[in-house]
Image (spheres, helix red, strand yellow):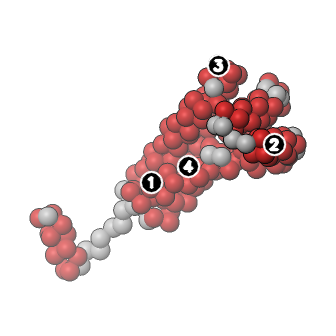
Amino acid sequence: MKKIVLTFGLIGGAIMAAMMFATLPFIDKIGFDKGEIVGYSTMVLAFLLVFFGVRSYRENVGGGKITFGRAFAVGILITLIVCVCYVVAWEILYFKFIPDFADKYASYMVEKVRTSGASQQAIDAEMAQMKSFKSMYENPFFNVAMTFVEPFPVGLIVTLISAAFLRKKTIAATEDDGQRAQLQVQS
């Protein structure tokens, strides 16, 4: 299991890290809205490796069968590795190459509220919230936690779907099971 989890987890993590390194330096040209679409699309693409990893485990280790619990365990381990790769890539980018990202994001969010026609009170509230966000985001522990939480729900959903879809149990060779197998073949 270790080899399959590491292989598929690191490939998924490499996909996310590569896209992050390729697109984030150009966030000014791409825009935050489009950047979010690109980012989550990349996450879904990377987390497809969870499906393939669980299927590989089922076929190569499980002999063609796997329970939901085992499939979930394999999938969630792959998801955790992908998320850790994502966090490492973000930390490198944020602290070494784009340390002004929080300022740019805060300006974007305040401008978004301003252009929506919100009152000055709402704009001031957004400015205060962004100021608080920027100060918390400078703390590496908070930064890591927030970054990990971003892709994890996507990976969890893909893991649950993959485990449900790929689970296969063996049918015991009893007379009743033989009749059930015949009925399944006929349907």
Q: Earlier in the sequence, mark 3 or mark 1?
A: 3
The residue located at (82%, 28%) in the rendering is 100
Q: Earlier in the sequence, mark 2 or mark 3?
A: 3
Residue wearing tag 4: 154
Mark 1 vs mark 4: give the one in front.
4
Instruction: Check residue 29 in the rendering and tell me which mark sits there, or answer none.
Output: 3
Taking depth in this image into account, of 89 and 8 the one nearest to the observer is 89
> In x, y percent, where is residue 71?
48, 59
The residue located at (80%, 24%) in the rendering is 97
Q: Quadrant of the C terminus?
A: bottom left
Residue wearing tag 1: 162
Is 60 rendered above or below residue 116? Answer: below
Q: Are marks 2 and 3 in contact (CB under 8 Å)?
A: no
Instruction: Using the numbered discs, state the Cα–Cα distance from disc 2 to disc 4 in whole angstroms.
Output: 33 Å
Instruction: Using the numbered discs, state the Cα–Cα distance from disc 1 to disc 2 in whole angstroms.
Output: 45 Å
Tell me the SS state at disc 1: helix
Mark 2 vs mark 4: give the one in front.
2
Q: Earlier in the sequence, mark 3 or mark 4?
A: 3
> In x, y percent, where is residue 44?
51, 41
The residue located at (62%, 46%) in the rendering is 151
Taking depth in this image into account, of 53 and 2 the one nearest to the observer is 53
Amino acid at circle 3: Lys
> For the image shown, how many numbered marks are present on the structure?
4
Mark 1 vs mark 2: give the one in front.
2
Is 175 rendered above or below residue 42? Answer: below
For the question of whether residue 39 can be seen, the reply is no
